[in-house]
Image (spheres, coloured by chain):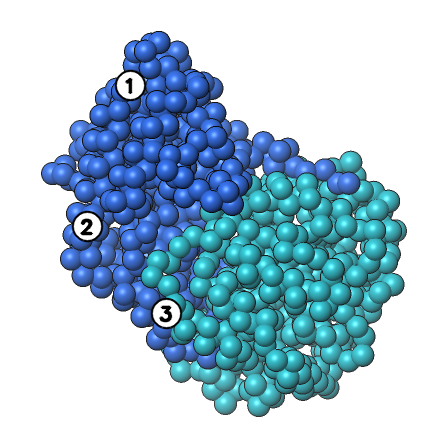
Chain colours: A cyan, B blue
Amino acid sequence: MPNISRKGQRMPASPIRKLTPFADKAKLEGKTVYHLNIGQPDIETPAGMINAIKNIDFKVWAYTPSEGTLSYRKQLTKYYNKAGYNITPEDIIVTSGGSEAISITFMTCLDAGDEVIVPEPYYANYNGFASQNDVIVRPIMSYIENGFALPPISEFEKNITDRTRAIFICSPNNPTGYLYSREEMEALKALVLKHDLYLFADEAYREFCYGDQPFISPMHLDGLEDNVIIIDTVSKRYSACGARLGCIISKNRKFWEIAIKFAQARLSPGMVEQIAGEAAIDTPDEYFERVKSEYTTRRNTVVNALNRMEGVYCPNPGGAFYVMAQLPIDNSNKFCQWMLEEFSYENQTVMMAPATGFYSTPGAGLKEVRLAYVLNNDDLAKAMKCLEEALKVYPGRTVGREHLVVSSWH
Amino acid sequence: MPNISRKGQRMPASPIRKLTPFADKAKLEGKTVYHLNIGQPDIETPAGMINAIKNIDFKVWAYTPSEGTLSYRKQLTKYYNKAGYNITPEDIIVTSGGSEAISITFMTCLDAGDEVIVPEPYYANYNGFASQNDVIVRPIMSYIENGFALPPISEFEKNITDRTRAIFICSPNNPTGYLYSREEMEALKALVLKHDLYLFADEAYREFCYGDQPFISPMHLDGLEDNVIIIDTVSKRYSACGARLGCIISKNRKFWEIAIKFAQARLSPGMVEQIAGEAAIDTPDEYFERVKSEYTTRRNTVVNALNRMEGVYCPNPGGAFYVMAQLPIDNSNKFCQWMLEEFSYENQTVMMAPATGFYSTPGAGLKEVRLAYVLNNDDLAKAMKCLEEALKVYPGRTVGREHLVVSSWH
């Protein structure tokens, strides 16, 4: 049998999906499983997008330009400039989801052996795109104690080598929900300019900021035109994960001209999606206000319930729809599997993502889980009750035996 | 300004699209441009697919499983088993077009520095996927004189090194239209088994076979279960290039289990496309019969017209919707650009793809162009008339000065 590639053998399994067989088995046994493991929102996709699909009017489902249709890029420009980005349609390449935006960005900027610095915990699939390109991820630890704020710039400096090409951030953050402040963004700006690095910014959760703190994009900072690559997607913004419609934005022309070659190699993004995406831009502001209010309620339900549980700590995040919680347990992988295999409360259980998959430092995240608050508030309350009961009886619980401590990997 | 990756700098421009600025300018000047440069069919997408889109019924445009929905994979299984493939839904990974199918296949099987052998001329974008993975393409020359038949196996043997991992074929072929015979497929089978290689088979044009010669897939040959990776797409089959819906088929479980990790990293193929793809399987046979009859007529128009022109040679291909023609010209790149920039006949001109982009051997294809017969028969006849007139006046014409010769790179 021919060999599999070494990079294939190194590819990590998805921490978000790896417990799926256990969840399937639990469901077969008749248990209700609350899925807090995956960022698939239950919010309805805007009617304008759905109607745009239903009203398609073409005879030939044809390729579009590799960079996306001009009419969609014009609409996107409207959206981004309302957010203060000051771009033109020529700054955009439409992609098949945020995933392809990351993939093309990596290929355009990074060679095998190059390094990209990412504050951890981080979205686990970044590892997959790094593996694909034989790129090395250098994690910089952020900590639950201060809500996963930006680590000190001195920590970044320590990890910059002659192979460092980029800093990769995600704000509001998946998995932590942390929203970088203007001061934090300015500190990153000074760092990337000092070392002439790219700043990759995953902004999938731009529209999901709660409270008074404003969303700050690197596109809002002057002097970063050549450094910033924005990675975006409609997946979360319009609850349209299955559309696979994203984009790359950059004012660096050289970057754009090479990135488009990678985009040409895969010919075109989807045509129907771009029609729907065009309609999405006219989604009324009330849609986002309603969604934001819904997520704020949910976040409060989850954060309050978690912090009331003995030995549990959960910072209150400023955005996205995830929280990271530290639990009084021996091992989050074992615990999450046990929840599905062994535990039930009134015939219900909860599926969560063990946090270990969001760290690349070995041993980090062993006491943490990520919860996506993508279910309605009633189900979330039930899921929290389940979790509370589970923590009382989990054989590997550490409550009573130790306090919430600085973890061993600090 | 941060650097572009070396692999980005090496990325070739698309030979199919690189003359687009000249075509745009010609159109601005009021010329009619017949687009024979790109495989974008004008055939209508089956009504069943379009209606499936119009009739979507969901509230949340959600992710699907990374391998595609079970219902779509079941339908695909029906389609492939009708073609004698003997597969199950577990052998399929649904992808974003044939492009992603190639990309995931390369990543799963090939590391940086590995080699893949491809008969040339070949679909130019294979170079892009090779560049992305730092993989080396070893071309084996096929020749217009015998219609681009499979080169002798001894030529493959000469090019097999300890880094060779795969043979990559495309039948019916883009750009040549050549359809491999059972004997040629059996020869390839013996070769890949002897050297324990993968056999990647791009079957985008499976439904486009003309005449009596049957389409033979490596899936029709016994004993290749671990070696064969089928790359497919609905783009050409249902004239749905803009759907970006393809798949990988393999009975090699180890391959599948690693390939799915790359598929998980990009989360999911498009949801609406899979709904449309499911409907496509029920496209009545008459659709394909009508399409085949239409393409046969077009092929005959083009091949006959070309061979009637002085100094032109065009083999009559068994499939796909491309022909390669040898023209009495100095340089196909110059000629194709001249056609757009300098020439017109009754205010019309023709856009073709210079064949050099389909060869990786330097100098090969200088006298050849690829023509896609994707316009209606009347327009094709007009395009052929234009080309005939152009060849009479092109400053770099070689008719009268030399005969159709074995090219210098032979």
Question: Chain for mark 2?
Answer: B
The CA span between labels 1 and 2 is: 41 Å
> Which amino acid lies under the numbered mark 2 shown in the image of this protein?
Ala
Mark whose residue sits in front, 1 or 2? 1
Where residue A301 appears, x then y in whole percent? 67, 86
Residue placed most toward the observer, B281 or A151 = B281
Residue at 46% over, 83% down: A32
Q: Nearer the viewer, mark 2 or mark 3?
A: 3
Q: Mark 1 lies on which chain?
A: B
Residue B315, position as x, y percentages in the image: 24, 27
Disc 1: which residue: B311
Question: Real-space Cα distance between discs 2 and 3?
Answer: 26 Å
The local crowd at label 2, few if under 14, some if 14 to 19, many if 20 or more residues have their Cα within 10 Å, is some
Q: What is the chain letter for disc 3?
A: B
In the image, taking residue A288 as reference, residue B106 lies left or right, namely: left
Q: Residues within 10 Å of mark 3 (few under 14, many from 20)?
A: many
Reply above or below: A161 against B332.
below
Assign the C terminus of chain B to one quadrant of the image. Answer: top left
| Pair 1/3: label in front | 1
> SS class of the residue under badge 2?
loop
User: Total marks drawn?
Assistant: 3
Which residue is the extreme one toward the top? B401
The three-letter amino acid code for the residue at tag 1 is Gly
Question: Circle 3 is placed at which residue position?
Answer: B53
Type of amino acid under label 3: Ile
Please state the horizontal and vertical placement of residue A160, each as a whole percent of the image: 80, 43
Q: Earlier in the sequence, mark 1 or mark 3?
A: 3
The reply to whether the C-beta atoms of the residues labelled 2 and 3 are less than 8 Å apart is no
The residue shown at (50%, 62%) is A274
Point out the residue furthest to the left here: B212
Q: Name the residue under label 2.
A: B83
